[in-house]
Image: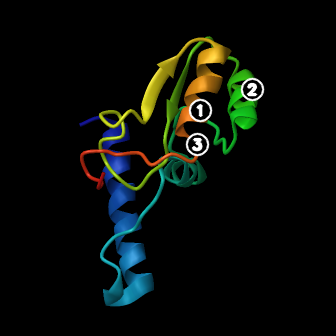
Amino acid sequence: MSLFSCCLFSFAFLLHNTAFQQTELNANKMNLHEYQAKQLFRDYGIPVPESQVAATTEEALAAARALGTPRWVVKAQVHAGGRGKGGGVKLLDNENALHDYAASLLGSHLVTPQTDA
C-alpha cells in the first residue's frame, strides 16, 4: 500500500467519524462534491491535482487559462457515482470545445447509473 493510499484511507475514516459525531444518529453519510473533498485534502497537506470550480462558461474558460495546461478534464459536480458513464466527465483540448461542453452541462439534469432519469 502506498503512502498516499494509506493517508487517504486514514483521512476518509476520520472524516466519517467526525461527521457521525457532529450529527449524531440522524446522518449516516456525508455528501461532498469532489472539489470540496480536494479542498479538505489540501487543508490537511494531502497532495491533490490543481483544479478550479466554475459556475458559468466564462468562469470555465478563465479557469482553463489560469491552469495553463493544453488539456483539461471537465467534471460535473453531482452527488452520484457514474458521472463518466452519464456524460459528466470529458477530456478537452481546445477552448471552443470547453465552452460548448460547459454550456451543455450547466443547468442540465445529469443522468447517471445512480440517478433517476
Tell me which residue sits at (35%, 52%) in the image: 80
Which-is-in-front pick, marks 2 and 3? 3
> Does the image show residue 89?
yes
Crowdedness near tag 3: few (<14), some (14–19) or many (≥20) residues, C-alpha within 10 Å: some
Q: Quadrant of residue 52?
A: top right
Crowdedness near tag 2: few (<14), some (14–19) or many (≥20) residues, C-alpha within 10 Å: few
Give whichever of 102, 77 is nearer the camera: 102
Marks 2/3: CA–CA distance: 20 Å
Residue 22 horizontal side relative to residue 117, left or right: right
- Mark 2 or 1 closer to N-term? 2
Give how far across and how far down residue 66 sits, in percent.
75, 26
Q: Which mark is residue 102?
A: 1
Q: Which residue is mark 2?
A: 66
Marks 3/1: CA–CA distance: 6 Å
> Does the image show residue 50?
no
Q: Amino acid at mark 2?
A: Ala
Q: Which mark is residue 106?
A: 3
* Whether label 2 touches label 1, CB < 8 Å: no
Crowdedness near tag 1: few (<14), some (14–19) or many (≥20) residues, C-alpha within 10 Å: many
Give how far across and how far down residue 2 sits, in percent.
30, 35
Q: Amino acid at mark 1?
A: Ala
Q: Helix, strand, or loop for circle 3?
A: loop
Residue 47 horizontal side relative to residue 55, left or right: left
